[in-house]
Image (tube, rainbow, N blue to C red):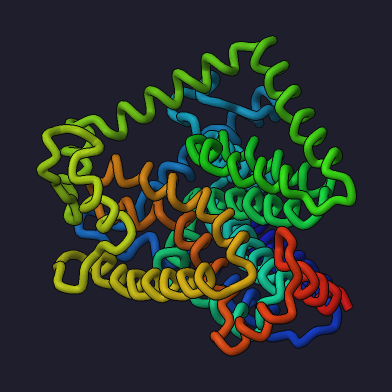
Amino acid sequence: MVGPLLAVCLGILLYFVVRAGERGRDNKMLQIILFGYVVRLVLQTFIRDVKLFSHEAGGDCESYEIMATEIARYWQVRGISFMTQDDLPILGQASLPPNLFAGIIYLNGGEATRIGCTALIGLAAGLTCYNLYRLAVELGADPQRARWTMAIFYLGPTYLHYTSDMFKDGLVVFFTVSALASSIRLMQRMSVLHLAIGALSLCALWYVRFYLLFVTTAPLVVGLLRGRSKSIARPIFGSLALVAAGLMVLGLTHAAQDVSETASTTFMRGTDATFRSANAEGGSGVMFDDGGSPYGQLWLKLIYTVLAPFPWASGSIAFHVGKVDVLIIAFFMYRSWKVVRTSELRLVALMVATFVVPCTVMYATSMANVGLIARQRLVIVVALAFVAALYQPEKQAESAKASAMTGPLGGRDMESSLAKSRA
């Protein structure tokens, strides 16, 4: 009974968060967010049992359910505590999702509740979409254009599938977007709130998909250094304080060695020829004539990473549905390119690129399975969706450019947009 009750409560929470953010504006974005939330709750009732992939029905959502149930039963005996791979080796590095799911299962008397856990992921998905929509509007994007751009991602096949059950991907995208959005807001002005959100998001990423920590740190630092402040000293001292705190932690603990060893081990494992060969054994596997080097035929791997599955390829139901996502990605890339070329927000786009480019190269080095990469690249797609949401037709862009002053985010034009969004 806890599961359905929690689904209702989290839905109400999502409603009030979005309603408060809109502050009397039209309810179209609220309707889209709530619609997507309900769709996810409906899909979770059967999606795990449908054989979308050539090799299996469901996916690792079942593994997370098993791990979360084990944690909840442990808590019933020993008391509640955050469990890591040191306590339960099967958790691996991504220990936050099963602990969060375990909290819901614990409240449900130790019995698994798919709807309750999916409601948490649905909440994360809704907040992710709304966060980027709100940020795009704050930066001067047309609300209608930004709304439909983010809705395309929010209701896109791959993101919808991996946020309609107990997958961790909704949490991965949520924490990544939280860090990136805080970085951009810090570029506007120094904010203790967004500095805290960014830092907490980075910490959470370590326990969700740890290697994304390395590619999301750069935009956060850039945001701190470019903070719009009357005095340049404030963001600089903030950055120095953050670095000093980090160095202190690294010096007093084994964190530096642990980070280095974990990153090195993961990279070697992900790019190992044997591991890539094993990944390629699935119905959507790909083998490259790269001589066993992760950087061999990198140009081709990059194309697969971003644009696979190709229209002419054959495979499972999910494989063909993934082709819809490729069209969406191509649309986002086109709009993003127009933003970089014509918009006064090109600095924002370039800042996002400090995440997108290294992340794409990182995934390309371990590219071996189209189905897997379609799931991993969600963080890249959502970043492109945000930049695409900033798109303006050329006439509007030229008008904005003519009225803009120099500044990190577009000067007077940006101040006007921000003032309107707060009105």
Above or below 399: residue 6 = above
Quadrant of the rendering where the N terminus is positioned: bottom right
Above or below 266: residue 232 = below
- Give the mark count: 0
Relative to 108, is 58 on the left or the right?
A: left
Question: Residue 284, percent across and down?
Answer: 19, 56
Q: Residue at x 49, y 30 (%)?
A: 93
Query: Residue 122 or 130: which is nearer the viewer?
Result: 130
Relative to 405, is 93 on the left or the right?
A: left
Q: Quadrant of residue 262?
A: top left
Query: Residue 223 or 63: which is nearer the viewer?
Result: 223
Question: Residue 130, percent across and down?
Answer: 66, 68
Above or below 293: residue 297 = below
Question: Residue 101, percent across and down?
Answer: 59, 45
Q: Residue at x 72, y 48 (%)?
A: 226
Relative to 288, is 22 on the left or the right?
A: right
Question: Residue 120, percent across and down?
Answer: 62, 56
Q: Quadrant of residue 90?
A: top left
Relative to 298, is 314 on the left or the right?
A: left
Query: Residue 3 or 344: which is nearer the viewer?
Result: 344
Above or below 295: residue 61 = below
Q: Inspect this view and state whether residue 42 appears.
A: no
Q: Residue at x 57, y 46 (%)?
A: 111
Q: Residue at x 71, y 58 (%)?
A: 408
Quadrant of the rendering where the C terminus is positioned: bottom right
Q: Inspect this view and state whether residue 1 appears.
A: yes
